[in-house]
Image: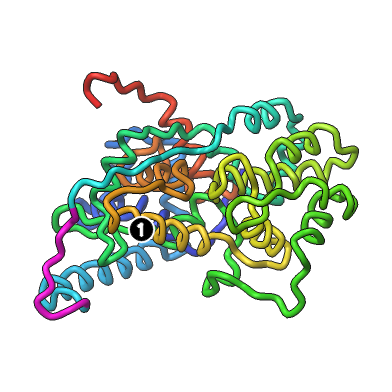
Amino acid sequence: MTVVATPLSGSEKLCLREVFTSVQDSGSLLGYIRTYGIDLRSVSKLESFIIENGLLDRVEGNANVHRWSEQTQLGKWDSITLGYMSELSDYTRISVTQNNLQELKVIWDQWSNETKQSFYGKYRDLPYLFDIQVDENLFRAIVQFWNPAYSCFTFREVDLEPTVEDYTALLRCPRFQCDRIYSRAACVPTFVKKLMTITGMSEQWIMARIKEKGESRCIPWGTLKDLIQTHPDEAKRVDTFALSLYGLMVFPKALGYVDEATTNLFYRLSKRVTFVLAILAETFRSLNACRRASAGRFVGCAQLRLAWFYSHFRLIDRVVCRVFFKDYSLLKDIAASTRRVDVPEKIR
């Protein structure tokens, strides 16, 4: 397995923060690794890698910035309004209604390893979200700590919010155009033309299957499912499956359909436009709307939101050693760890 040196993401910094805090206190990286049961055969390799690439200095610098930020906030409070008191609103009755993804998962499970690798190479780690069970009670509990004034979670005196680095690390998506939430092209193809490009079907075939849902045009999941199962071109099957995954799981605005806005974003992926900021923007907007109204349906990827929560509050086995490997997937580790935990209903 190849070990590479890459810039630390936000999630990697979080994973390593407690390691180097312990190192500063005890002066022994080896002692920390032994304490947490990490394979000793990996210790010397990991320690050499950290020292040779200057990671101790980098993480120490991150820790200094973190301490400075905390001290500044304690000393000067925040910059919203002088005298503002941050208060969480009353209980929010939020619906976590999602699309039924069973048919999509069955198709994925039936694919060969070669086809799956083709998908991973182009669309990265999204399929691991199939294995993140949506605990509606936990999700509703987390939402009660969302502060719409700050657009962050407020846990007592601690503010926490998902970042671009967090989601980029979770999904292992390419890091490009991270300063642009949405992108507008000079010449924008029509909805029909985009679907023709993605699916490889004719204009007449697409036109006959487009539906109206509210103010948006959509294409039914049933139509895309038939294409995935019968299309002779494997590349088009993979692309159509990815479009369905985005429309049904990541941006589930119209249940049972993939809407035009999702298709527009998906079409732009091939133009090197990241989708991470769009996911964050839609998530913030939905959480803010629900909290301010004290009710509503969460329109976003609940699986990804819970995966982010787990990445901050659950210890992933031996993640410190594996985080530097080129093929390491944090989302895969989280999915595996959540499957191993059986929480009795009576203590939830």
Q: Residues within 10 Å of mark 1 (few under 14, many from 20)?
A: some
| Residue 251: % across, % down | 55, 51
Mark 1 is on which residue type?
Ala
Q: In the rendered image of this protein, does residue 216 appear above or below residue 130?
A: below
Magenta stretch: includes residue 141 = no
Task: Write down the residue under mark 1.
Answer: 289
Magenta stretch: includes residue 88 = yes
Q: Nearer the viewer, residue 161 or 221?
A: 221
Residue at horizontal 63%, vertical 48%? 124
Residue at horizontal 41%, vertical 51%? 47
Look at the image and tell me whether residue 251 can be seen.
yes
Residue at horizontal 62%, vertical 73%? 183
Q: Which residues are magenta?
A: 80-89
Quarter of the rendering containing residue 337: top left
Quarter of the rendering containing residue 268: bottom right
Look at the image and tell me whether residue 45 can be seen.
no
| Residue 132: % across, % down | 47, 35
Q: Nearer the viewer, residue 197 or 202?
A: 202
The quadrant the C terminus occupies is top left
Quarter of the rendering containing residue 287: bottom left
Q: Nearer the viewer, residue 241 or 29?
A: 241
